[in-house]
Every structure is written in structure tokens, then in C-alpha cells.
Image (cartoon, helix red, strand yellow):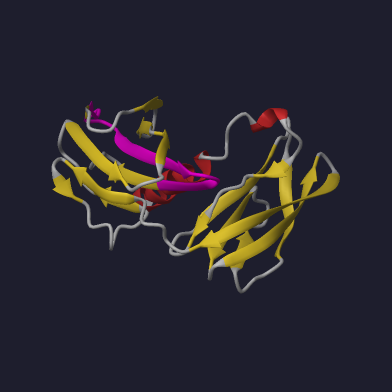
Amino acid sequence: MKRTLLKVLSLCLLLAVLAGGASALAEPHLRKLTLWLGATYATAVEGLEHDTWYEILSVKSSKPKVLKVRFDDGGTLVDLKPLRPGKSTVTVTYMEDDDSHTVSATYKVKKYPKPFAWIKVNGKSVNLKKKKFAVTYDDYRKKNVKVQFKLKKGWRIANLPLSTWNDSESSEATWKNGDTIELPMDRNAFLGIELRKGDDTFSYALNFFRDLPGE
């Protein structure tokens, strides 16, 4: 159960990162990103003060046949599930310090864009027909990993985040395409590939899980 939760958290983190930025300086708004069929996403209200408490009260999709939305009671994240190509406006009502507010954003849902010519992990090609958005390696026992990828025309790298963690500590860094990366033997690891093409964004997750005590 715990390992499954870590997988979900690492993938959600990657899919949400692209539009994060320095939003704390902006007006309250919903995190925006391009939605691709076959994946699920999470969005949140951004632009609030760092110490501000808020809770989502309601969520509505203007075209529920294009984009399905849901949230957990008392939560701060909105789950987005693309159903078919199109556009849908998501409206969120939330409570912030005893006052209710409303924000909205229009999301594009598109067909899977096939941004990679290939991805290789330790020299072995990833099956992108089956692993379109993420690949997970359980009980990873090597000290290092080498990830290489080639993009199709028009796509460019926006960021390559790297996270390692266990129950007591974590760290954040970046990595480079084709480098051999040392992974701590006592931590799980997450490598992200964040891409842009025009106004579109795309994220890919590579998860490396250790057989750690208690997991």
C-alpha cells in the first residue's frame, strides 16, 4: 500500500510541476497544463499566500463528456480525467480564511502526441506503446541509472527534475539526458522529463523504487 501511494504521489508531482513556477506572486488561479487522453491529472488553486489555509467546496466542468472532475472533501486538489478531445472550463469554489472564492480555467484535451522517438533506461528501450506517460522499476538494485531519450520534431526540454526520498529525508536536483546518475541505495528515486511544444506541455515519469524497510 505504501509503495503504491509513493508511485501515485511521484507521478502526480511530475504532472503538476510544469505550471508551478512563481505563481505565489500572481492572483489566485488554477494551475494550467495540457491534458492528454490516457492520463489523469491534478490541479490546484495557486497564487495564495504561503500560510493561507484553503479548502475546496465544489468543482464543475463545463463539458463533463470532455473532462471529468472530482475532489476529496476537505482537500486542496482537483482530479482531472480527460475523456475525449475538446475544451472544458473548470470552475472551483474554495474556502479561504472563512471566505468563499471562485476561480476557473479552460483546459485543452488532446490525443496522445507521441513526443519521443525513444527512451532508453540502462541501454534498454522503454515500450512507449504500453508506457505512454510513466515507467516504474520495482526493487531497483543498481547504484546508478542512465536515461537517454530522443525527442520528435518541435518538442524541447523544459526541465529534468530529480527527486530521491525515504521515510526520513528527501532531496531535489536536476539531471541531464544521457548522463549516468548515482542513486542513493537507501532512497527511492523519481526522474522527470518535462517538455514543451508551443503552448503545449507534456511530462513523463521514471520511478525507481528500492526494497526499503517498512515499505
Determine whether 188 is above or below 51 in the image. Answer: below
Q: Residue at x 31, y 50 (%)?
A: 116
| Position in image of residue 70 (x %, y %) | 62, 62
Determine whether 179 is above or below 110 in the image. Answer: above
| Position in image of residue 119 (x %, y %) | 24, 47
Q: Is residue 152 left or right of residue 30?
A: left
Q: Is residue 75 visible?
A: yes
Q: Which residues are magenta?
A: 181-203
Q: Residue at x 42, y 51 (%)?
A: 8
Q: Residue at x 27, y 57 (%)?
A: 128
Q: Is residue 190 left or right of residue 56?
A: left
Q: Is residue 144 left or right of residue 57?
A: left
Q: Is 188 covered by the magenta stretch?
A: yes
| Position in image of residue 194 (x %, y %) | 42, 40
Q: Is 73 covered by the magenta stretch?
A: no
Q: Is residue 209 visible?
A: no
Q: Give the main secondary structure of the magenta stretch.
A: strand
